[in-house]
Image (tube, rainbow, N blue to C red):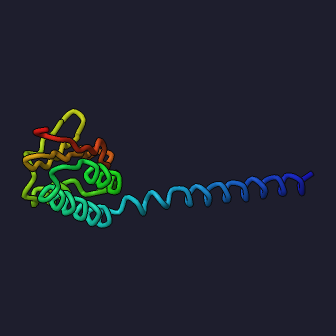
């Protein structure tokens, strides 16, 4: 009977180790996605492409929609660095802040198109990426 208890205890220990190891494998990809440097690199490219499109595109909204689909969501950015990068765009409009939600609304406008997204500083994730006409 002692041998059976030892075997049962060993089986539980092995099972616990397997569950712990597999949960680490599940968590690891989200850690990689949340890298602040990678997020800022992605945000920098996104904001640069917004500027390029706003400077030339006046008749088609789909390039902006596709751009948002490619870059959404931005995850794991340092909020201050993300906002600083956004303010470097010549198309940036005043960034608004909702203190209750801890969320920033970042908007870029040309004479024709508005592109915007919100950034949740608690979850460190963007959402509601959108694009629309201003004067059409």
Front residue of this view, candidates 66 and 129: 66
* Residue at 20%, 45% in the rendered image: 116
Looking at this view, name the residue that lies furthest to the front: 59
* Residue at 85%, 52% in the rendered image: 5
Looking at this view, name the residue that lies furthest to the top: 100
Front residue of this view, candidates 123 and 40: 40
Residue 109 vs 28, above or below: the answer is above
Looking at this view, name the residue that lies furthest to the right: 1
* Residue 92, position as x, y percentages in the image: 10, 52
Tell me where residue 70 sits by quadrant: bottom left
Residue 130 vs 38, above or below: the answer is above
Tell me where residue 129 sits by quadrant: top left
Give the left or right position of residue 20, taking residue 100 as reference: right
* Residue 84, position as x, y percentages in the image: 13, 58
Front residue of this view, candidates 23 and 98: 98
* Residue 124, position as x, y percentages in the image: 30, 50
Give the left or right position of residue 27, taking residue 34 as reference: right
Figure label count: 0
Where, quadrant-wise, is the C terminus in this rendering? top left
* Residue at 24%, 47% in the rendered image: 61
Tell me where residue 81 sits by quadrant: bottom left
Front residue of this view, candidates 110 and 11: 110
* Residue 76, position as x, y percentages in the image: 32, 56
């Amino acid at each position: 009977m002692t041998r059976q208890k030892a075997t049962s205890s060993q089986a539980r220990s092995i099972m616990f180790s397997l569950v712990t190891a597999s949960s680490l494998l599940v968590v690891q990809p989200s850690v990689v996605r949340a890298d602040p440097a990678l997020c800022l690199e992605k945000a920098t490219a996104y904001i640069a492409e917004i500027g390029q499109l706003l400077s030339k595109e006046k008749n088609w909204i789909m390039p902006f929609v596709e751009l948002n689909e490619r870059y959404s969501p931005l995850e794991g950015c340092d909020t201050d660095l993300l906002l600083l990068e956004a303010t470097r765009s010549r198309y940036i409009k005043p960034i608004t802040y909702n203190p209750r939600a801890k969320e920033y609304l970042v908007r870029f406008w040309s004479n024709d198109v508005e592109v915007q997204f919100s950034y949740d500083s608690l979850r460190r994730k963007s959402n509601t990426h959108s694009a629309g006409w201003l004067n059409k």
